[in-house]
Image (cartoon, coloured by chain):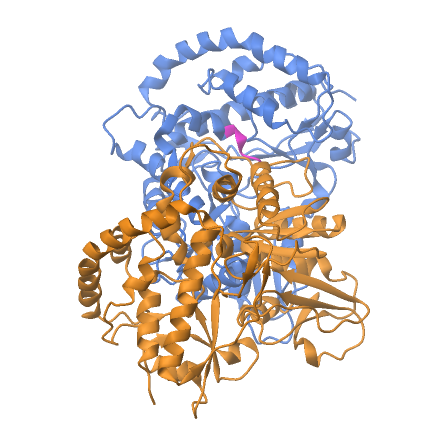
Chain colours: A blue, B orange
Amino acid sequence: MDLPSSTHPLVFSMRHFFVLSLALNVSFILRSVFEREQGLNWFGFESEKERITQRTRLSVSSSHSSITTLAEAQDSGERIINLDHGDPTMYEKYWQQMGDKTTVVIPGWQSMSYFSDISNICWFLEPEFAKQVVRLHKVVGNAVTDGRHIVVGTGSSQLYLAALFALSPSDASEPISVVSQAPYYSSYPSMTDCLKSGLYKWAGEAHNFSKEGPYIELVTSPNNPDGTARHSVVNRNKGTLLHDLAYYWPQYTPISSPADHELMLFTVSKSTGHAGMRIGWAIVKDKEVAKRMTKFVELNTIGVSKDSQIRAAKVLKAISDTYEHVDDSEVGETFFDFSYHNMAERWKLLREAVEHSGMFSLPKFPPAFCTFFNQVSEPRPAFAWLKCEKDIEDCETFLRGHKILTRGGKHFGVGPKYVRISMIDRDENFIRFVKRLSTIRI
Amino acid sequence: MDLPSSTHPLVFSMRHFFVLSLALNVSFILRSVFEREQGLNWFGFESEKERITQRTRLSVSSSHSSITTLAEAQDSGERIINLDHGDPTMYEKYWQQMGDKTTVVIPGWQSMSYFSDISNICWFLEPEFAKQVVRLHKVVGNAVTDGRHIVVGTGSSQLYLAALFALSPSDASEPISVVSQAPYYSSYPSMTDCLKSGLYKWAGEAHNFSKEGPYIELVTSPNNPDGTARHSVVNRNKGTLLHDLAYYWPQYTPISSPADHELMLFTVSKSTGHAGMRIGWAIVKDKEVAKRMTKFVELNTIGVSKDSQIRAAKVLKAISDTYEHVDDSEVGETFFDFSYHNMAERWKLLREAVEHSGMFSLPKFPPAFCTFFNQVSEPRPAFAWLKCEKDIEDCETFLRGHKILTRGGKHFGVGPKYVRISMIDRDENFIRFVKRLSTIRI
């Protein structure tokens, strides 16, 4: 796997310090792991107290190289490992390293009004957030923003629904079909159909779609769950494309060119790791579509948290600042270097574990040139799309037997031989997972 | 109009100081008003720069008694006065007075996970927010919380939709009817029907509802737009009640007893004035309903901004603290005293203006005992439900001719002789409104 040449020199000189400090902390971590395994937590989540303890300890081992060293920790196989959700807690470590650079301070009397910018179509969009969204896309080169409208949402989930509302004909006699190539994001069918809308209806696998008339095709690229680069597959008249680009960031996939589609969705959850903010944004070409999406968010939640928009703006700004060297002070490791290296090391460990076990297989991704890192590299998706080999028919159930919680293929519109596994959880959880996976035999 | 006896003695001693300081500032405010009227802003909104200027000036005149003095300011009748929305900017002044007591500081690495409390049905509910919600209801005595489930939402709008989802039978052959006594909140019909859901359907005025079978009756009390106390009116078998209690707070209405309904909605927008946070909460008796509402928020936005929940918790805590004297330091004016006095003074000014003009009328509200203020008082609703008298058939259009933007009765399911007017805008805007209203003649 290629490593980018743009790594900040400082990181290498600091690694020695972190490896040293890590060594001093491994005994604490192992002890913590051991203690926790005495009590079985069926959900596999840590309590808040445990999280704080873990955070304090891990913050000392703050370089991404720590992950390899952590791999030497023992796993007794008893603790539930939950990698069902794509909770992006891997990123906590980076923002800890950044200290107070992204701390927000909001006085009690600020941001009280419903309105953010009444001169904008999206009247609840905080101008500073919009500015930092555009700036980051220019820094990364992953999306065209010139002449486009930005619509903010409570996560990209809300914007997915807003897009369906905006793209559906309001006077049609029957709901418009929404299709996507399988495997597709497991929540899309239930999100689409939960209110039995008369405007739109989930119609499943795009390859099987043969109905005449208008349709909406959802293209998730890189794809959730399998990480592949995706293009539309129906390609008929009267089709409208909706691009979910949540994972089109340099830590997950080579950036080939600025994406330039009619309607593109992004989210901080998967770009910066701030899922708890519930902030997503849409980049929209057509003014009327932007207006209708805004109307949907107005009817759904009367706007989007200003506090989270302000905080998201600060986080996006911090990332761009380190690349544009706005601040003369020590920038530390850049965000995408940290994220790239973590993902690369995790994929290396996972592929080694899969090879060691001999029970599973993973997709292979063709290397491609990344305009952001200015070199050829392989995709390192946020989810692993793992296939059970041999005679295992139900991979989710099989792994559950080993106390590893994943999401089975049937949720994504395919067979049960596949599971989706989060690659962006905290170090400790991920390392315990690869260790356990590597030892699984029939 | 009765005034509460529980006003903090300090307020009276400080008033003299504020009146003095206000006198020094009136010339600045008048100049500011004059300057702004040179440029006509069709939306009637102030620019951010103007707002900051106004905030700086108004913060000096920080007692609620300033509003009467402000009434002496001149109004040339040219500037648009927008009181269409219920933007609760009146409350900014109180939170400015509180200084840094409700300032939140959020480090960049905090609240990154999707999850807040996986032991709770509502897994995205921040425990501290839930704790402060329960505490404030106990302090105010306006809702029963013991043994109930709290579900947080992106404003109470999202919880209205979550409640419809939760209360609708999932296997019915046709959508359940949603009814409410007119005049009802103008957004409810469009929120209910915007996706043409097969689960529920707006069926309008509750008094006209004659269909057999299950229905959901929405009871908003005090009512938006007309401020009246409301009870269910259909009262048939198979009816489910949904109570919107956004305005059941002591500044708007006498608190008669803790509300004790199956499903009650509240929001910070109208209780503390923090509309920009987009935080509401539901108090739910039935566990299965709480589960389904949680599922809706999960499918709609995968949870609710943690940042805003944290900030809302701090604001609610500050209010309760001043009543429970947790902090030994100077508490200043209590929140509900400030709000009560402001609303009382505004209603007094409005009734004087209406009497002076002779063109309009307002509802009369029966006084009642308020358990919170421990005295009899009259309702002081967040909206005025103004009726045009004489031969004016379309009150909204008539007032628009005087550059006063309001929301006409037809939006609320009644005739055009009525308009809804926000009573919770900033002092300057409200005062300009009553001055202009008082001078209107045919």
Q: In the image shown, does B436 or A313 lie closer to the viewer? A: B436
Residue A230 rendering spot, x and y as whole percentages: 53, 47
Q: Is residue B115 visible?
A: no
What is the tally of numbered marks visible in this picture?
A: 0
Q: Is residue B438 visible?
A: yes
Residue B202 rendering spot, x and y as whole percentages: 65, 72
Q: Residue at x 35, y 47 (%)?
A: B96
| Apparent side of residue B85 relative to residue B129 in the rendered image (left or right) | left
Residue B214: quadrant of the picture: bottom right
- Write the start and end of the magenta stretch as one range: A86-90
Q: In the image shown, does A32 or B332 lie closer to the viewer? A: B332
| Apparent side of residue B21 relative to residue A137 in the rendered image (left or right) | left
| Apparent side of residue B165 relative to residue A376 in the rendered image (left or right) | right
Q: Is residue A234 above or below residue A417?
A: below
Q: Residue at x 38, y 70 (%)?
A: B349
Q: Is residue A364 above or below residue B423?
A: above
Residue B286 rendering spot, x and y as whole percentages: 75, 51
As drawn, the residue found furthest toward the bottom would be B391
Q: Residue at x 53, y 84 (%)?
A: B415
Main secondary structure along the magenta-highlighted residues: loop
| Apparent side of residue A84 relative to residue B56 in the rendered image (left or right) | right
Q: Is residue A321 above or below residue B85?
A: above
Residue B396 rendering spot, x and y as whole percentages: 42, 81
Q: Is residue A88 magenta?
A: yes
- Quarter holding the C terminus of chain A is top right
Q: Is residue B410 magenta?
A: no
